[in-house]
Image (cartoon, rainbow, N blue to C red):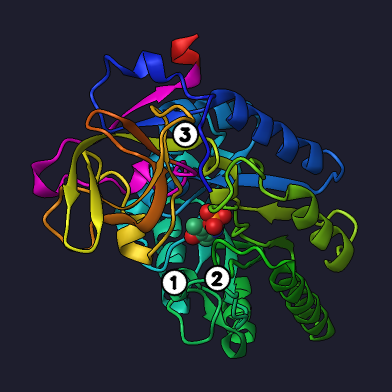
Amino acid sequence: MVRVMKDFPTHSFQTLQTPFYFYDTALLQQTLDAVSAQLARHEGYRMHYAIKANANPVILRMISAKGFGADCVSGGEVQLAIAHGFAPKSVVYAGVGKSDWEINIALDAGIGCFNVESAAELHVINELALRKGVKAPVALRVNPDIGAHTHANITTGLAENKFGINLEQLGSVLHETLSLPGVEYKGLHFHIGSQITDMLDFQALCNRVNSLSHELSRQGLPVGDINVGGGLGVDYEHPDNAPLADFDAYFDVFRRHLDTRPGQLVHFELGRSIVAPCGSLITRVLYVKEGTSKRFAIVDGSMTELIRPALYHAFHLPQNISSDAARPVTTYDVVGPVCESSDVFAKAIDLPECHRGDFIAFRTAGAYGETMASGYNARPLPKSYFSTDFL
Ligand SMILES: *Cc1c(COP(=O)(O)O)cnc(C)c1O
């Protein structure tokens, strides 16, 4: 299927150095409004945007301006969140390997919650907090042993996984938490994986949270607030059919299946679904190379700007946004210039005939694109532009 994208300001791109990221500010705003509308239906629902999906300063400012909190996975992200307008109390911090300096930064900043992933980490946080004469707010990250139907590299909720505390150990770690003077127990944290589009996976999570809450209560233990993590997927194949993730279906699952008590907060940590659709990587065709059995479109963008195809075999729909509808369709392998055979964006894809200098946009690249960029092959980090830059 070939589409000619009319919405890119292709003319304004002519003078710019490619590759670069282009973000549709209006689409991001629409997405944030859609999420806010869902949250507004529940007094106890709180959103913490997962900063690792996209930490572009302009994007962080737009999201913090919406009143969302931040979900961080490093001390650097905690600092970044606070520097870009996120209220410290709205910052939650997960990660299996928090260094002492990172914990100290988060304690000094007065973040809302440490999502603790092991008993060993709990004791270190307790000690560092006592040294500062403060109490660290903590939630216990539980590994719920739920296999989300997603790529193995981005599944985090299985028993054989480095993330979180196993179900069998939860009771004893909770007892320890309640006994330590440097920590204050806030609740339970879960995160089952990413790019999840089957709502039954989130329903399974709700069921697991319900039974766990019930079991803890039965043992006379506190449950506290619930953090259900992130993971909602987007449609990479059809970016224009469904420009927004299915937030209705997603929040509906929690409304219908998660048992909550009066006053209990439910925290969400969406990343990808908030920022993926609004971003595209814009590249130029350098060469069209005729192979023996295939034709290569070699573009100037690569795995150093967008590593997801090389890392996860992820698909980002390429579009020739320089072509008019009259050009014949040709089949290409679209590849980058980096010296790795995995530096391939798409194989055997139909595009309007590509010419040197054409702009190729890789769609749905707003999440885990710019944040994962590297300087491999001494390539410069990509710049970013926003639709509002070209008004
Ligand atoms: C990465 C991450 C998220 C966000 O996941 P998405 O799939 O981008 O929504 C949320 N919570 C934690 C703990 C994470 O590590």
Residue at image position (53%, 52%) is: 236
Apparent side of residue 103 relative to residue 26 in the rendered image (left or right): left
Question: What element does badge 3 sit on?
Answer: helix
* Mark 3 lies on residue: 82
Along the polypeptide, which appears first: circle 1 or circle 2? 1
Whether tag 3 and tag 2 are in contact, CB under 8 A, the answer is: no
Within-10-Å neighbours for mark 3: few <14, some 14–19, many 20+: many
Residue at image position (69%, 72%) is: 201
Alpha-carbon span between mark 3 and mark 1: 26 Å
Comparing 221 with 27, the one in front is 27
Magenta residues (range): 363-387
Q: Nearer the viewer, mark 3 or mark 1?
A: 3
* Mark 2 lies on residue: 180
* Mark 1 lies on residue: 123
Residue at image position (46%, 81%) is: 161
Question: What element does badge 1 sit on?
Answer: helix
Alpha-carbon span between mark 3 and mark 2: 28 Å
Give the amino acid at mark 1.
His
Mark 2 C-beta closer than 8 Å to ligand 1: no
Apparent side of residue 275 relative to residue 297 in the rendered image (left or right): right
